[in-house]
Amino acid sequence: MGVRLECGPQFIAGTPDLSHVLLISNTALTATPLEGETAESTGGLYEWSGGRLALVNVLPAGEPNVKGGSLGLEPRETLEEHRHVLSDDGSRVIWKGQAGFGGVHLYLRDMSRGETVRLDLPQAGATGTGEEQPEYMTASSDGSRIFFLDRELTADSTRGSLELYEYDLDAPIGSRLTDLSIDHNENEKADVNMVIGASGDGSYVYFTARGALAPGAPSNCPHQEASTEKTACDLYVSHGGQATFIATLSTEDNINKDLVGFGARVSPDGRWLTFMSNQDLTGYETTDAFSRRPDEEVYLYDALQHRLVCASCNPTGARPLGIEVGEKEAGSSGHTVLGGSTLKGTTWVASNVPGWTPGVGGGPGYQSRYLSDSGRLFFDSNDALVPQDVNGTEDVYEYEIPGVGDCATAGVTYSVRSGGCVNLVSSGTASEEAAFLDASESGGDVFFLTKAGLAPLDLDNSLDVYDAHECTAASPCVAPAPAPPPPCDNADSCKPAQSLQPTVFGAGPSQTFSGAGNVTPSAPAVQPRGLTRAQKLARALRACARVKGRRGRAVCVRRARRQYGGGAARNARRSRGNQSAGPRR
C-alpha cells in the first residue's frame, strides 16, 4: 500500500490585483463539507477573497456526481490548462469535473451568484452526445467568452472532427454555443489542434487546424490525431464569426499544447500576433548560411491590415546565421540559449521569443509581455541585424512600426522588407549572450539578462538584470549613479579631501564687501603693434644662420627673402631700372 503525501493547498491563478486567488487542496478547507464530499474525494477547488474561502467545484442543480453528491470529483483537471480560468474581477471560475457516470465536463462557476453552468452541453440538432472530454483553451478577461475544443456540439459541426467552440454567456440561452471552425469542404475535417490565444475581450481568437477553413488555406496539413505533439497546421484568426487564413506552419515550429516551449503570443487588443516559423512566409530566404537547414525566425501578423512580416529577418536580405538548439541526445534539457523557447527535437534558430515561465508542477505559469498593443515586439536574435551588433552571439532586439517610439520611414533603422524599425536593446558587444526576460505593458521598460557592464556601478562579471527604459516627459530617465573612486594606493591618494572652512568664521571678505567695485581704467589699453616685414625678415635670417650645412642655409635664406623681402627688392629694382633708361621720346 503506497503512502500519499499531502503537501497542502496549491496555487492555480490570481486576479491582476491578487484580491482573488484560486487554489486546490486534497483536503477540505471549509468548515462544512458538501453532500457527497468524503475522505475519498480528490479534494476541492477554492476561491479566496476578502479573507474567506469559497468552494468552486459545485455541480449545477440537479446534476449529481457518481456518489450522489453535488461536488465535482476531478478538480485537478484544471491544472492541465489554466489560461484565464479566473476572470479579472474574480467573479467567474472555469473548471473541469466529473458528474454522474460519464466523462469529465467543462463548467463555469459564478461566485457572486452561487451558480454553476455546464459549457459542453450539445445544442438542439447536434449529432454528438456531449460525453467527449472537452479541452479547455482560454477565455476573455471577464470570463464571459470561453473557448474550448470538443466534438459535434452544434448542428453545423462536422462529424468526428475536433472543433473550436465559443460559449458566450451574454448570448440568449440556447444559442450560446458557436462552432468557430466549420469546414465547408466536403469530406474534410477541421481537426483543430489548439488555440494560440485570444484578445482580452474575446473578439479575436487565433488557432491552428488541419482543415482548409478559409480562402487561400491549402489542404496539405496531414490529418493526424489531435494528440500528436508536432504537426504541420494552418494558422487562422477568427473575428466577427469569420475565419481568416494567415500561414501554414511546419512540424518544427513548436505551435503545440506544450505552452512551456510555446513561441507565440497575441497582443491584449487582439490586433497583433507574433509566432516563430522556419518557413519562407514573406519571400525571405530562411535557409541558414552555415547549416543549410531552415532557421526559425520571428513573424508579426497585423489582423487589421491582414499583413504578415518577418520582424527578425536580416534587413539586408542576407541569409540568417542561426544556432542548433533542442534535444541532441537523451537527457538534454531541450532549452535554447538564455531566456529562449524550449524546442523539442533538434531545430536551427536564428531568432526566438521566450516560452511560458513554468509554474507549480512544471506547467505554464506566466507568459512574458514581449508584444504590446502598439505592435512593439521584443525578441532574441543570434543573427546580427544592425552594424552595432559585433559580438557574434545572441542579443535582445526591438521591432517597431512607423509612429511607435522613434521609428519613422525616413529613419536609418527602417526596413522596407519588414515595414518597421529594428534596434538593439542589449549592447551587441558583450562576449556572452543576452536574453529578453519581460517588458512593461506598453513596452516602455524592457528587462533583460546580460553579463555586460552597462552601468557605472556594475563592476562584476556576473549575470545582471537591466531595465532599458524609454525616456518620456511623463517618465523621464534618471541619471545613473557615478562610479565609486578607485581605492587609494599611495600616501597622496589616501589623504582625505580638503574640508571647507568652518561656518563659525563667517563668510569671507569678498562675499561681504559692499562698494563701487573694481576701478575702471581711464583709457583703453593699447594693443601692441605687429612686426614689420623687415623685422620678420631679419628674424627669419637669424633662424637660417642656425641651419647646419651651407646648402641648407642658402635654401632657407632664399625662402625667407621670397616671403618677407620680396616687396622691398622689387621696389629697389624698379628704381634702378628707371634711372638707367633715361627720358623717353
Image (cartoon, grey):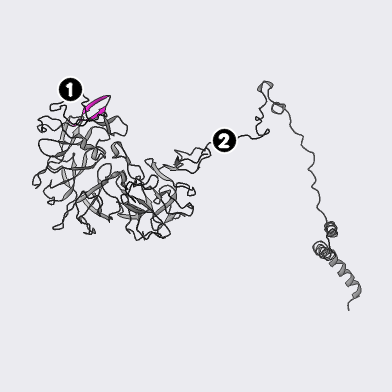
Mark 1: amino acid: Thr
Expressed as whole percent of the image width and height from the top left, the position of residue 314 reads 41, 57
Quarter in which the C terminus is drawn: bottom right
- Check disc 2: other Cα within 10 Å, few if <14, some if 14-19, many if 20+: few
Q: Examine the image and state in which quarter residue 147 appears.
A: top left
Expressed as whole percent of the image width and height from the top left, the position of residue 374 reads 36, 46
Say the numbered circle drawn on residue 484. 2
In this figure, which residue is indicated by the disc labeled 1? Answer: 32
Depth check, front residue: 414 or 255: 255
Expressed as whole percent of the image width and height from the top left, the position of residue 440 reads 38, 40
Q: Which residues are magenta?
A: 38-57
Expressed as whole percent of the image width and height from the top left, the position of residue 21 reads 27, 31
- The image shows residue 484, relative to residue 337, as above or below, that is above
Q: Is residue 308 magenta?
A: no
Say the numbered circle drawn on residue 471. none
Disc nearer the start of the sequence (1/2): 1
Depth check, front residue: 468 or 333: 333
Query: Looking at the image, how many numbered discs can be counted on the residues?
Result: 2
Q: Secondary structure at mark 2?
A: loop
Q: Is residue 41 magenta?
A: yes
- Residue under the image location 48 percent in, 51 percent down: 391
Q: CA distance from mark 1 to mark 2?
A: 63 Å
- Check disc 1: other Cα within 10 Å, few if <14, some if 14-19, many if 20+: few
Depth check, front residue: 559 or 32: 32
Depth check, front residue: 253 or 313: 253
Mark 2: amino acid: Pro
Q: Secondary structure at mark 1?
A: loop
Question: As drawn, which residue projects farthest toward the front?
Answer: 1
